[in-house]
Image: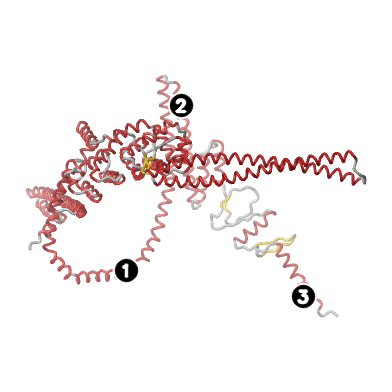
């Protein structure tokens, strides 16, 4: 069998480098021959360039064609896989899948969407339950594509929104067109787009469907909320909570609904009976609560009166005891007046006790009535809760959002009542819908008559594109056409590869199996080579590191030289800039003077002055850099560095004219103290110019600092105790040395006395 692939590879991969080298040799030989042969050399060189360019162009064209075919094949494989998955979901025959394939490619060729994108949409529809006949005959797939075009979104997003709308409202997939028409009419008539409308419905639609609300009214509510500034998840969440509050109101919410006279719930017969009973129980409960409140107030008043009577009796009894105690202290009998006063106070207390008994009886009766009312209120409250629960369970839905809004508006409901019924989020949504009540009703009516809205809007868009020449639409159509061509090209190529694979599958597998030992030997050889290369690399690593030791200092020196060069050039550049600014300022002043624009002369003179300042600074800096550089080389660069840095700071200050000489002269006369010395007055000096030095203060109050410096320098230290100076370890404090002397000195004196007394009789 001829190895056509190998031959093509050799031809397309021709080494033009060797070819050019050979042709160059021929042309050089012809040049050397001279005469007419030199012309042939020129021709040969030209032919070499032309031939090489031709071969390169052929290779490039072949490579581009191969890349295009590869991409076409990959595109067809991906499309075919999507189609196969769709067919598996639908469970259709090969003929039906061929029809669906034709429909997908037709839609892809005639719209802005590619066949691959339409195929993905078909797969989503199949998952949702749309059969192949509905996609083709009922044009479900084409209508969905139009819905995506109308919404200005990708086809996957449009498919998800449309399917979610169908499923959320319990509709059949053959009603997908109706859903897309309603949604199209909504976002084209309100301040929402298809994405925010879909987000809102995602949160509100399931609850709305359970409340018996249709998609026309729910979508209109989302659109009206968008007009009020509530969009997307905010609108959907608010609408959902408002519906929930109506389906399952709390006791306080139900009471507010009853107070406003709202009839918004659709109930079963049992629910209606429970609602009627709930109304009676609620009225009884309200009356009982009022009676309980009145009795509580009455008991509170009786308690106050009884407290007052008790206080008055206690005061009278105290007065009687005080009269008797006073007579006892005076050791006498009660006077007639005192006896009469006691009798009068006793009579008053008797009367007060009688009143107290009457009031206490009234309080007992009131408490008994209050207990009965409290028990009744508890029973009514429990009964009302049960009835509320029954009403909730027997609620089949709401009349409509429109009726809720109309009844709220007619009842004159306050904001507080709206929030009490619907809560904060739900109340915000209802309050917003109340402000958009007219537009909401109009949008509901339009949604109910929205049949064909998607097709109409899509045709309108297409008409505008045709009239105005939409570049975006043209580009999408071009891309779609290109993909269609790639699918057409890729299909036979992939089928050819499949045939080849089927024909040579066994031979290829056998060849791989036979060559497995060769692959194994190759892996072993690679491992052995690595075992040789790694030690060699490790052996060469120290030499590489040593080489870096020599390279790094050289790089450092070059960097320092560059820094010095920039320091030298900086004042020179400032000098040149100053000269240019002076020239420009003078020219501007002359032009202003000649042209009569005298107001521009001061600005020009200021520019001249600034230029003169830059000239002076640049010139002085240049001179100083030269002097500092010389001194730096003479003293290993230290003096020059100090002078350059200090003078640079002074040059940039505003005190330049008065301090230049004073700032420079001390550094020019600085002395070195490498061999030591004593300084008794302010003296410019160099430190460390010949090696390490220590500067030691000599003041009497600098003993501690002096000792620390001496110790840090490794020169020991000194400790002063009165007039005694001890040279030694400066880490010892004076107190520690004093303690040591007090401990050791007596011992030494005793030993000295003992030695001196030997031999003395």
Quarter-of-image position of residue 194: top left
Residue 237: in sight, yes or no?
A: no
Say above or below: 182 vs 9.
Answer: above
Q: Nearer the viewer, mark 2 or mark 1?
A: 1
Depth check, front residue: 551 or 278: 278
Which residue is tagged 3?
Answer: 751
The residue beneath circle 1 is 536
Q: Earlier in the sequence, mark 2 or mark 1?
A: 1
Circle number at residue 427: none
Question: In the displayed structure, does residue 702 sit left or right of residue 96?
Answer: right
Depth check, front residue: 137 or 247? 247
- Residue 593 percent location from the top left of the image: 42, 21
Disc 3 and disc 2 in contact, CB within 8 angstroms? no
Residue for badge 2: 603
Apparent side of residue 403 relative to residue 473 in the rendered image (left or right):
right
Work out how far the residue at label 3 is from the one at label 2, CA to CA, in angstroms.
Answer: 96 Å
Q: Going by the picture, which residue comes out furthest to the top? A: 596
Horizontal and vertical percent position of residue 666: 57, 45
**Upstream in the sequence, badge 3 or badge 1?**
1
């Amino acid at each position: 069998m001829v190895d056509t692939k190998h031959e093509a590879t050799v031809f397309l991969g021709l080494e033009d480098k060797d070819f050019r080298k050979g042709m160059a040799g021929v042309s050089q030989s012809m040049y050397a021959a001279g005469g007419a042969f030199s012309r042939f050399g020129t021709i040969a060189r030209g032919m070499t360039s032309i031939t090489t360019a031709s071969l390169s162009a052929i290779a490039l064209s072949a490579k581009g064609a191969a890349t295009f075919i590869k991409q076409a094949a990959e595109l067809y494989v991906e499309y075919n896989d999507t189609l196969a998955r769709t067919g598996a979901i639908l469970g259709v025959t090969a003929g039906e899948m061929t029809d669906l394939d034709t429909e997908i490619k037709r839609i892809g060729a005639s719209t802005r969407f590619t066949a691959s994108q339409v195929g993905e949409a078909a797969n989503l529809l199949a998952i949702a339950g749309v059969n192949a006949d509905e996609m083709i005959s009922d044009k479900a797939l084409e209508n969905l594509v139009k819905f995506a075009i109308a919404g200005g979104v990708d086809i996957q997003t449009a498919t998800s929104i449309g399917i979610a709308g169908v499923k959320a409202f319990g509709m059949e997939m053959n009603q997908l067109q109706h859903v897309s028409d309603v949604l199209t009419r909504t976002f084209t008539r309100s301040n929402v787009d298809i994405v925010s409308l879909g987000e809102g419905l995602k949160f509100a639609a399931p609850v709305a469907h359970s409340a018996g609300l249709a998609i026309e009214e729910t979508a209109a509510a989302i659109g009206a909320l968008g007009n009020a500034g509530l969009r997307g998840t905010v609108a959907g969440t608010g609408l959902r909570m408002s519906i929930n509050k109506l389906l399952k109101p709390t006791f306080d919410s139900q009471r507010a609904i009853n107070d406003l006279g709202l009839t918004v719930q659709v109930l079963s017969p049992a629910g209606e009976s429970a609602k009627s009973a709930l109304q009676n129980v609620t009225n009884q409960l309200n009356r009982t609560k009022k009676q309980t409140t009145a009795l509580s107030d009455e008991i509170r008043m009786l308690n106050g009166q009884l407290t007052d009577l008790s206080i008055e009796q206690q005061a009278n009894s105290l007065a009687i005891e005080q009269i008797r105690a006073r007579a006892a202290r005076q050791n006498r009998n009660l006077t007639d007046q005192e006896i009469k006063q006691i009798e009068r106070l006793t009579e008053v207390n008797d009367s007060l006790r009688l009143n107290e008994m009457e009031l206490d009886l009234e309080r007992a009766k009131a408490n008994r009535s209050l207990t009965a009312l409290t028990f009744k209120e508890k029973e009514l409250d429990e009964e009302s809760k049960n009835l509320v629960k029954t009403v909730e369970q027997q609620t089949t839905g709401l009349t409509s959002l429109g009726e809720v809004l109309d009844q709220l508006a007619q009842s004159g409901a306050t904001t507080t009542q709206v929030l009490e019924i619907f809560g904060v989020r739900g109340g915000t949504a209802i309050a917003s819908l109340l402000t958009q009540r007219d537009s909401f009703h109009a949008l509901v009516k339009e949604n109910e008559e929205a049949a064909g809205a998607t097709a109409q809007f899509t045709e309108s868009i297409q008409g505008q594109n045709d009239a105005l020449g939409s570049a975006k639409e043209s580009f999408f159509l071009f891309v779609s056409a290109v993909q269609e061509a790639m699918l057409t090209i890729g299909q036979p190529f992939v089928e050819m590869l499949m045939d080849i694979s089927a024909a040579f599958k066994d031979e290829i597998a056998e060849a791989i199996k036979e060559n497995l030992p060769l692959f194994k030997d190759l892996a072993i050889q690679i491992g052995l080579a690595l075992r040789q290369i790694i030690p060699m690399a490790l052996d060469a690593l120290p030499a590489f590191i040593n080489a870096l030791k020599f390279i790094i200092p050289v790089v450092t020196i070059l960097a320092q030289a560059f820094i010095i060069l920039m320091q030298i050039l900086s004042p020179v550049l400032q000098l040149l800039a100053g000269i240019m600014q002076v020239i420009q300022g003078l020219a501007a002043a002359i032009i202003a003077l000649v042209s009569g624009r005298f107001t521009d002369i001061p600005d020009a003179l200021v520019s001249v002055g600034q230029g003169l300042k830059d000239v002076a600074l640049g010139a002085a800096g240049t001179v100083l850099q030269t002097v500092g550089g010389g001194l730096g080389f003479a003293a290993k660069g230290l003096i020059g560095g100090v002078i350059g840095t200090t003078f640079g700071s002074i040059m940039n200050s505003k005190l330049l004219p008065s301090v230049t000489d004073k700032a420079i002269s001390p550094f020019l006369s600085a002395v070195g103290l490498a061999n030591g010395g004593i300084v008794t007055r302010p003296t410019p000096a160099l430190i460390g110019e010949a090696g390490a030095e220590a500067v030691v203060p000599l003041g009497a109050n600098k003993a501690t600092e002096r000792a620390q410096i001496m110790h840090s320098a490794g020169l020991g230290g000194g400790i002063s105790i009165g007039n005694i100076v001890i040279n030694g370890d400066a880490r010892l404090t004076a107190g520690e040395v004093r303690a040591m002397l007090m401990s050791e000195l007596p011992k030494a004196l005793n030993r000295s006395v003992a030695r001196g007394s030997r031999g003395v009789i």
